Each structure stands twice: as C-alpha cells, then as structure tokens.
Amino acid sequence: MKGPDPARSEQQILRARARGEVSAEVSFEQLYTLYGKPVLAWIAMRAGPGHVDDLFQDVWMIFFRRWQGWQFLPEMEAEGAKPVLSFLFRTCHLMLQGHRRKQQAKPQQDVEAVDVPDASGGAAQMIEQIELGRCLKLAREICPHEELDVLLAKLSGVPTREIAQAMKMSEPVVDHKFRDAVARLKERLAPAEKKSKGVERRGKNG
Amino acid sequence: MAERNIAAELAGEWQELLAGLEPVRAGAPGAWLASGGPGRPSVAQLYAEMEDVREEWLALVNSAAVHRNAEKGITSQWTLRELLAHTASWGKEFRVEVERAARGEAFDYRIDFEPEVGPTAWNHEEVGKRQGMTLEQIRTEYDEEAERLEEIILGLEDARIAAEVDFPVMIGGEQPMLRSIGETVLAKCGHDRHHIERIRGWLEKQEKGEGQ
C-alpha cells in the first residue's frame, strides 16, 4: 500500500479506495493532506482563536468515523463532484453552529474565560501569525455569517449544490449571497476619492 | 482606472492563506490512527452528528417517495410508516435516557436485547403504541425529540458527556450497558443512519418497480 500523495485529487483517492488499492487509513491520510488546510482556514475565519484546535480535530474525528463506512456512489464520478470536501464543509458548518449555540448557552463569565486565545501553540497560533489579505480580513469583519460561509466555501471549490444543501438554501440564493459579499467588499474598498465624488454628486442632485 | 476584480483578489488571497499554513500537523490524525480511532466526542462534535442525521431523516420523511410507499411492507413485520415510527420511538427513548443520565438518576426499568436480534419485544410494543399515528405525527415526534436531545447535550460539559453511566439496556444478561452519554448519542445517530440508508435503498427499488 502506498503512503499519502499530496498531489492526488479527491476523485483519484476515492477511486483508489473504492477499488481497494489503498487502505482506509492511507486514503484518510491522503484526504487529510488534501483538505487539512482549507478546513483549518474555514474554522480559523469563523471561530475564536481559542477554539480552532478543538474544532479542527472534531471535524476530522467525525470524518474519520464516517470514512470507515463511506459509500462510494456513482455520483462521485460526476464532473466537479467533491463529496468529501462537501462533507467536510457541511460538518464544519454544523460544528460551528453547535459551537455558537453552546457559547450562547454559557453564562457570560464562562464565555469570557473560554474565549481567551489559546497560547499553547498548535493550529490556532499558526493562524494568528498569518496575515490575512485585505479582502479576506474585511470579509471577516463586515460580512454576515451566512455570506462569509458561502464566500469561503466558493473559494475552496465546494460545489454550489452542496453549499446550498448544507446551508438549507437554494442554489440561486447561494450565488446571490456570494455576489452580495463581493459587492459589499467592493463598496468598502472603493478608493476614497470615488466615494467622496459620489457623495458630492448626490449632494448636488439632492 | 480599471474596476477592481474583488472575486479574483479574494481567490488570490485565499490561495496565499492556504500556502501560508504549515503542513497541518497539529492535532493530526496519526495519533488516533495509532490508538485505533478518535477519542472522546465533544459537545460540538455530538451536536454536528445529531443535526446531520436529523436533517437527513427529515429530508427522507418529507420526500414524495416516502409518502407513496408508507403503507408497503418494508420488513417481514413492519410497513415503512411503522419503521419510521420505530426510529421515532428510539428518538424518544434515547432522549429520556440521556436526560436522566445527565441528572444522575438511576434507571428503574430495563430494555432486554436478544443477542444478534435486538430488543424485539420492546420494539414491537413501542411501534404498537404508535399504530394510529400519521406520517406527520411521527415526523413531529422525531423532530421534537431530536431538538430536545440537542438542547440537553448543548447544556452539558465535555467531562459529563464522557462519564460512564449504567444505561437500562441489557444485552443477553443481567448487567446493564455501561457507556457514556457521548457514546449513547453516537449510538442513536448510528441507529438512525442505518435505517435511513436501508430505507433509501428500498425506496429506490420501489420507485424503479423492483419491489415485491
């Protein structure tokens, strides 16, 4: 059995596993190598730094359990199909939902105690040291939760149909939220002079 | 000045972000693999599992195929509607067990499992109690119990979830099943998924006209 190969695509890994060419353990490692970074980035963009490590591990624990009995359906051969990436996105989405509900249910002083950034290193510290690009940083600041989820999923290549299913919305709504997020960023990142001209023009007309 | 292409900028920044992450090793699965599997489930993890299976179950029950085939026999003893009532009955039972375990209460009843077969008598009694229920009533019972179970779990600390409890399930003997609340919730999710997958497969055959 071969070891993990980072260059393999999801479909290649799934096919090899379905044919019994790789073990469940090796293929799991391959998928972890392929998708560990986007999963970490999704969580880091959406949860407080003190929770990144735990949530990241939780997502992979869920996938590990599911992977043992994974069903290799014919749909996985469809062009652009990424059932594992879609599963990971849906799981992250549900985990973060649970995490938020759990935090809301806690008394305020507990929330503050838990939300202290994790100083013990690991993924959380790594994320904190990374400078986010201007657009991503702004997206995290100004986009509503759902828009940010859609944005991150689209950037990672999760198929629209799967985003829609995970977020319980229609595909046109997913596309609409993506366009809204981009428009929101465009508006905020517009050069200052353009904004002031707009204000001036509105002032003259009004 | 040319219009900024924000979508392209975002895509570039996303790739930069991913490239900046070290090969992910913190919390890597190697340790779990070596020890034979993942460790104890957390509250957030259990919530994700519960909500996932709840959505899958509701999507199934809301489908037109279920309504068309509800009164057909899916097992030698039950119709599809009765099998769905069976999942609802366990939804209630799991919630009751977790609620009592979370309060530290002992169980004053038992559910006998026959090895390889399961708790046949209990199952039939509970399905019998739901004989007059419509699909909509079964759906409501399942969904309400799932919501209650999620609320209970979200109110517990990880340590409470991991503590072992004597549950009322007896498998081929007198000893109650010793397991944690977390394991019980995962067992509930596994039970429901098992039935969902079998129902989906059966429905596919019915819809293709391959059923009996």
Image: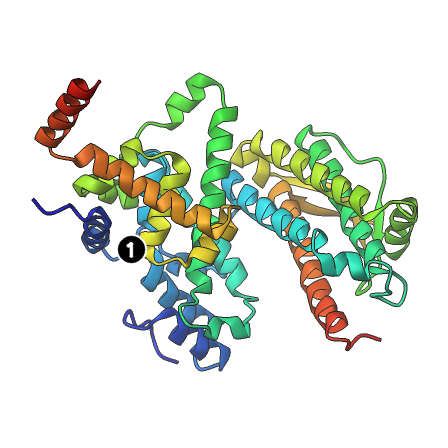
Residue A19, relative to residue B107: is it above or below? below
Which quarter shows the C terminus of chain B?
Answer: bottom right
Where on the picture, by quarter, is residue B157? top right
Q: Which residue is mark 1?
A: B24
Which quarter shows the N terminus of chain B?
Answer: top left
- Pick whichever, A176 or A119, lies toward us: A176
Question: In the figure, is residue B176 to the left or right of A192?
Answer: right
Q: Is residue A120 visible?
A: no
Residue A24 position in % (x across, y down)? 47, 71
Residue A130 position in % (x across, y down)? 18, 43
- Provide the chain ID for the residue under circle 1: B
Residue A120, relative to residue A11: is it above or below? above
**SS at badge 1:** loop
Q: Is residue B10 visible?
A: yes
Residue B117 position in % (x across, y down)? 82, 63
- Pick whichever, A33 or A79, lies toward us: A79
Residue B79, relative to residue B86: is it above or below? below
- Pick whichever, B70 or B148, lies toward us: B70
Residue at x 15% of width, y 46% of height: B4
Colour pattern of the rendering: rainbow
Question: In the figure, is residue B100 to the left or right of B46?
Answer: right
Question: In the figure, is residue B159 to the left or right of B33?
Answer: right
Residue type at tag 1? Val
Estimate how packed mark 1 is, as few (under 14), some (14 to 19) or many (20 or more) residues with alpha carbons within 10 Å: some
Residue at x 14% of width, y 46% of height: B3
Seen from this angle, which residue lies furthest front? A205
Residue at x 50% of width, y 77% of height: A18
